Amino acid sequence: MCGTSRFVVQLIVILYTAMEVCSKFEFTNIQCTSLDKEFDDIEYCYIKSVNRSYKYISIKVKLFKTPVTKVNAALYQRLNGYKPFLYNITLDACKFLRNTDRNPVAKYIYELFNGHSNMNHTCPFDHDIILEKLPSNFLNTRLTDVLPFPEADYLLETHWYAYNVNRAVIKVYGTLS
Ligand SMILES: *[C@@H]1O[C@H](CO)[C@@H](O)[C@H](O)[C@H]1NC(C)=O
Ligand SMILES: *[C@@H]1O[C@H](CO)[C@@H](O)[C@H](O)[C@H]1NC(C)=O
Ligand SMILES: *[C@@H]1O[C@H](CO)[C@@H](O)[C@H](O)[C@H]1NC(C)=O
């Protein structure tokens, strides 16, 4: 009897704690822009809502010339308009992919989408870049469990460079509520 009620109390505490931290991440918008059609083109770039619990983004960038060498990623949080928030990193894509442990922040961002993309291979990127069906739910776990973020609207803006010229911009919007 005593054991049972302690178990029930523990269960309630666990459920309560789970509810407390149960923020939910959702994609809200995505924009992909090619800045140089000679260099790359966006074949597709969209959010799809399959049902209430399954929403994902897919992106395919066709590269006509290679290589992409430099990537800048900056995180924004919306207050009055989107303001830079915490992270703004620029890195050499090839050096980074050779050893992701050297840059923990970039690694964290990279691991948000790596498993759903074809980016895990050695340089140079000499073929199309694909991000396929990255679900909100997956980011939900990473953003709320691994490194908790405050509830707000966010924008992850990435710039893709080749020969030091910005060739494409990908903006992913989401909300944590
Ligand atoms: C949502 O769609 C996915 C994929 O089709 C399916 O596996 C899942 O069961 C659906 N969820 C609900 C709540 O309908
Ligand atoms: C990020 O840093 C780069 C280089 O220092 C700068 O040009 C860019 O404006 C910064 N972006 C944001 C959002 O602060
Ligand atoms: C790529 O995948 C392999 C095996 O799945 C893994 O050992 C390696 O660490 C990954 N590399 C990167 C850069 O994520």
Image (cartoon, rainbow, N blue to C red):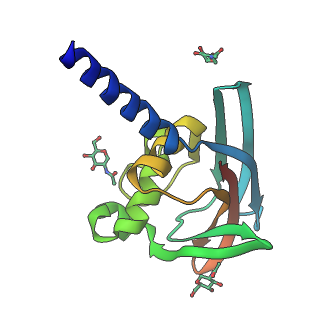
- Image point (47%, 43%), residue name: 118
13 in relation to 75, above or below: above
15 in relation to 77, above or below: above
User: How many tags in the picture?
Assistant: 0
Residue 4: percent from left, percent from top: 24, 15
Residue 174: percent from left, percent from top: 68, 51
Left or right, 86 with respect to 31, comes to left
Please tell me which residue lies in front, 64 or 17: 17
Quadrant containing ligand 2 reads bottom right
> Which part of the image, by quadrant, shows the N terminus?
top left
Please tell me which residue lies in front, 13 or 36: 13
Please tell me which residue lies in front, 157 or 127: 157
Residue 164: percent from left, percent from top: 59, 81
| Residue 169 at least partly seen | yes
156 in relation to 26, above or below: below
Left or right, 4 with respect to 127, comes to left
- Image point (50%, 75%), residue name: 89
